[in-house]
Image (tube, rainbow, N blue to C red):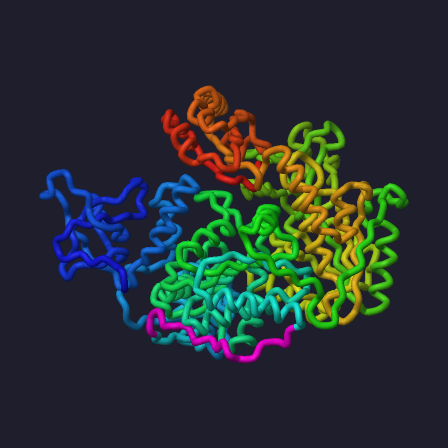
Amino acid sequence: MTGLSFFDAGDLVSVLTTEPLGRPLDYRAPDGGCFAGAFVEVPLGPRRVLGVVWGGGEGGYDLAKVRPVTRVLDAAPMAEAMRAFLMRAADYTLTPLPAMLRLATRAPGLADPPGPRRVYRRGWAEPDRMTEPRARVMDVLDDYGGAAFTLSELAGLAGVSTSVVKGLVKQGAVAEEEAQRDLPYPRLDPDRPGKALAEDQAQAAATLRAAVRGGRYGTTLLKGVTGSGKTEVYLEAVAECLRTGRQALVLLPEIALTAEFLTRVEERFGAMPGEWHSGVTQTERRRLWRMAGEVGVGLVVGARSALFLPFRDLGLIVVDEEHDTSYKQEDGVLYNARDMAVLRASLTDAQVVLASATPCLETWANAEAGKYARLDLTSRFGTADLPEMRAIDMRAERMEASRWIGPTLVQVVRDRLNRGEQSLLFLNRRGYAPVTICRACGHQIGCDHCDARMVEHRFQKRLVCHQCGESKPMPAACPSCHAEGRLAPVGPGVERLAEEVAERFPKARVAVLSSDLFGTARALKEKIAEIAAGGADIIIGTQLVAKGHNFPLLTLVGVIDADLGLQGSDLRAAERTFQLMRQVSGRAGRGERPGVALLQTCQPEHAVIRAILSGDEEAFWRAEAAERQAAGMPPFGRLAGIILSSPDVQTVFDFGQALARADAPLRRIGAQVFGPAPAPVARVRGRHRVRLLVKAAKGAALQPALAAWVAQFKPPANLRLAIDIDPQSFY
């Protein structure tokens, strides 16, 4: 606890709670005293709430009214660097500090005392009689692959009473054990031999190891073509971090990637790391949270929220697929995990590795400017070669009605089937059809709560809103004109593509990979493993398949609509299309057999399509950077989005117009305000949405100006105001 301030019993301390109060409150230190950063329970009105000792109290009032801290929790105090990180992150994102603290305390049972507790796992026997409640319990145990649960947690996940679980214990189908709470994780051995690296990989690994040994902050872009061994290289940096006795964090963009990655970690280090994502049980979340603060875990693999774990000595953060949009939190606290990783590392003298085959323009520009170091891997790992890439000009294809796979691509898929190789057909659109239209009156079925069309999901026999999640059965008659039998799907989704594939290739084994088709993360992981083992001939997928999966038998990638992402006025449309096409094309030819990627396009002459086919990525980034710089757009300028929402459309527009008129604090820093204007999806969950956009020069003090701007008004009841610094989407 070196460097931590200690407060004696009765001293005045300030405690930050997770309650929306906006600031720390004064309390008296309890008997026995407490350290700064201690997790405590304090009285707040009639309740007792979780808080952190933030420092000395302010005083300046009748101290007789100050209440004592109820108790100090049995958890390692929050490090000073972690508190600094939360404050800096709150200032940058313009988020109230209590909301940032909530991100850092997302673990159940933090106030529970230490000691043994009863846990429940999959038993050795099968139930004598399988009822629906029992089946749900067994499904949960199978889905989590041997994980332990508390009784209430297992019953809650299965949606049954605790008596159902206890009945399965009596039959041996569920095992009841007594286990210590929150044991340290097995030690990972950094000196186990890794895979043999090629010359450029070995040089990159040596550079990263030296940076980690130096114990200073630094950020490195690890750029390598798909399949170039980036993972093996940065695992060497992880090994060096573990040798120095410090902790490492690897962020992954997609939970489906964790199974394969964890296997690689276990092979490299001889034990499993800690996991932090939505698929982890609450019992394991509590254990990992506590062990992060006690240095009882050396390596954590997790989703973006793992960045807020209370690491005691964080020495390395790896952001894998750093360009991925899922690193941006789009609701609640709005933050970009990639940027927050750099901020946290700078406060703990840690190294950051940003790994990607197609880095985001912000990262590329920082490397060009010398702010980040850069390491390049130019060849694939082992004997694999990069796939050949070609465009299919759909203007020259003779397409049949209601068909989406052109004759050229059909023939190439057929050739792969004859050779016993796998093909991937990529379409970044979930469901069966994005629009359902009435051929009698032209009505398009929309969501009752959002200004969005409902997407037909034929596998589920329902219409689903991809904005709010509302679903309803497919109607037999048009909701507008009540004509029966006249509703028709318009456009393809992956389910409709699967229907066409089944008709064209009736003997092929077809697998559809889309996030909405799998009830659990475990089911998705099992399907991916089955495909990798050769369990499908044709894979149909959304962007889920573009994220790091390795299918050794896959030699063909066919992109059904390469122009899809180029439509609209999104600032990052060209960048994201380029990244997605290069990433999904990189799934081909990762084994011993060469691969090919074919892009069906109506715009083969488009600059982005030409850049994808040529492989001259640096030329694409330079051209994209020149356009952004000329327009003063990120990363050469700054943007902030203001999102207003209310059940009343007039209220939200009136408030937006009042904000726009009172823009003096922004004009003082040379910023411009655009809007208010209806959001592209103008109503979500019954709330009308209006957006304003603030544009400023790169060096402008944007956050203080924004804070002063919005502080001029008190939002009316039922109106929500959210500020999105560095917005990534504008829906």
Q: Position of residue 719 (x, y in %)?
A: 42, 29
Q: Is residue 28 visible?
A: yes
Q: Nearer the viewer, residue 374 or 309?
A: 374
Q: Which image quadrant: the N terminus?
A: bottom left
Q: Nearer the viewer, residue 709 or 241?
A: 241
* Quadrant position of residue 45: top left
| Left or right: where 634 falls relative to 171 | right
* Quadrant position of residue 484: top right
Secondary structure predominantly adopted by residues drawn in magenta: loop
| Left or right: where 563 falls relative to 73 | right
Q: Is residue 186 magenta?
A: yes
Q: Is residue 326 above or below residue 122?
A: above
Q: Which residues are magenta?
A: 180-197
Q: Position of residue 310 (x, y in %)?
A: 37, 59
Q: Is residue 131 visible?
A: no
Q: Position of residue 548 (x, y in %)?
A: 64, 61
Q: Is residue 699 magenta?
A: no
* Quadrant position of residue 176: bottom left
Q: Which image quadrant: the C terminus?
A: top right
| Left or right: where 286 falls relative to 540 | left
Q: Position of residue 157 (x, y in %)?
A: 45, 60
Q: Residue at x 26, y 44 (%)?
A: 24
| Left or right: where 101 falls relative to 329 | left
Q: Is residue 174 above or below residue 637?
A: below
Q: Is residue 688 above or below residue 416?
A: above
Q: Residue at x 70, y 48 (%)?
A: 578
